[in-house]
């Protein structure tokens, strides 16, 4: 396995990806990007498609940690969008990591995998609670989580799965959050997203496989149990809605 500190961010040009790259750079952690387009402010960047294994193998060469963010980000047409990007893409990312000797994978899942428990008011949602995926998008994230465990046990790669809160992609989504108390409580600011992934990349804890939640600080009610993220990787959110929401326009594709 590779023991250098270089971090590959797959999906580096997206709203969360740019925040992660910026935070890694702020901490002087070597970072390489991978996306369909060049990542702003990042010289070491591979332009490619997550459905193409050769693109990812090229990007994963010499990488110690891989952060996987790229996906169709919500419910969409399954055969043409979710299947290639969220299923085939996951396969290609995992295989590139294995073949490249990556020692740690940090995989972005979603709070939507416990959607029906949360909407039923059984809060806070804990990592040990049984999943209740919202629909097809959340089901693809359950696939991601399951194969993450498989790679950890079968290949000895340390895997951290993070179920993310709602980091808005557009001004319209930010307006939705502004009008909803529950959405404000599951809000994840770009800054806190960057801090979480940097903490997960930096932690020296020997983690074989773990699932954690990450969001910013809630205003009204705690929806996600954030203690595992604090205990395992040292992540403590620093922002609360609407802090960071002004960065949405700059971080969207």
Image: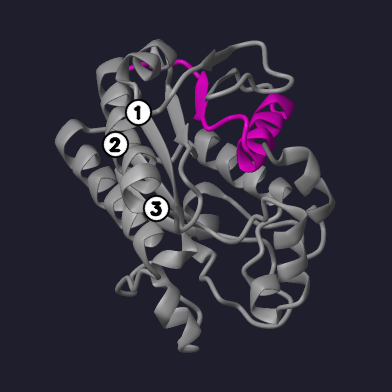
Q: Nearer the viewer, mark 3 or mark 1?
A: 3
Looking at the image, tell me whether mark 3 or mark 2 is earlier in sequence order.
Answer: 3
Residue pointed to by mark 3: 77
Mark 1 lies on residue: 51
Where on the picture, by quarter, is residue 150?
top left
Whole-Å distance between the Cαs marked 2 and 1? 6 Å
The magenta stretch spans which residues?
1-27
**Above or below, comparing residue 105 to residue 171 in the picture:** above
Q: State the residue position of label 2.
A: 88
190 to 216, vertically: above or below: above
Other residues around mark 3 within 10 Å, as few (<14) / some (14–19) / many (≥20): few
Which colouring convention does the figure follow?
one colour
Observer-nearest of 171 and 127: 171
Q: Are marks 2 and 1 in contact (CB under 8 Å)?
A: yes
Residue 91's x, y, as percent?
Answer: 27, 34
Disc marking residue 202: none
Q: Earlier in the sequence, mark 2 or mark 1?
A: 1
Image coordinates of residue 166 in percent, x first then y, are: 61, 60
Q: Mark 1: few, some, or many residues within 10 Å (few <14, many ≥20)? A: some
Toward the viewer: 48 or 111? 48
């Amino acid at each position: 396995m590779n023991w250098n500190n270089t971090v590959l961010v797959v999906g580096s040009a997206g709203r969360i990806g740019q925040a992660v790259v910026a935070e890694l750079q702020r901490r002087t952690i070597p970072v390489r990007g991978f996306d369909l387009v060049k990542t702003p402010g990042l010289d070491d960047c591979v332009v490619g498609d997550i459905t193409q294994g050769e693109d990812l193998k090229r990007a994963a060469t010499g990488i110690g940690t891989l952060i996987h963010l790229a996906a169709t980000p919500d419910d969409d047409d399954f055969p043409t969008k979710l299947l290639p990007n969220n299923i085939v893409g996951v396969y290609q990312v995992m295989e590139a990591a294995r073949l490249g000797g990556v020692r740690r994978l940090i995989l972005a899942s979603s709070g939507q995998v416990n959607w029906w428990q949360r909407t039923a008011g059984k809060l806070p949602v804990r990592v040990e609670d049984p999943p209740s995926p919202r629909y097809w998008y959340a089901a693809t994230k359950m696939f991601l989580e399951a194969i993450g465990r498989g790679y950890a046990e079968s290949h000895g790669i340390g895997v951290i799965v993070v179920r993310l809160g709602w980091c808005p992609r557009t001004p319209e989504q930010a307006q939705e959050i502004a009008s909803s108390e529950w959405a404000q409580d599951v809000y994840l600011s770009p800054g806190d997203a960057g801090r979480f992934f940097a903490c997960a990349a930096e932690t020296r804890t020997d983690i074989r496989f773990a699932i954690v939640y990450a969001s910013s600080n809630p205003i009204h009610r705690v929806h996600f149990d954030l203690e595992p993220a604090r205990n395992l990787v040292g992540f403590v959110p620093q922002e609360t809605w609407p802090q960071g929401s002004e960065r949405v326009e700059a971080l969207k594709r």
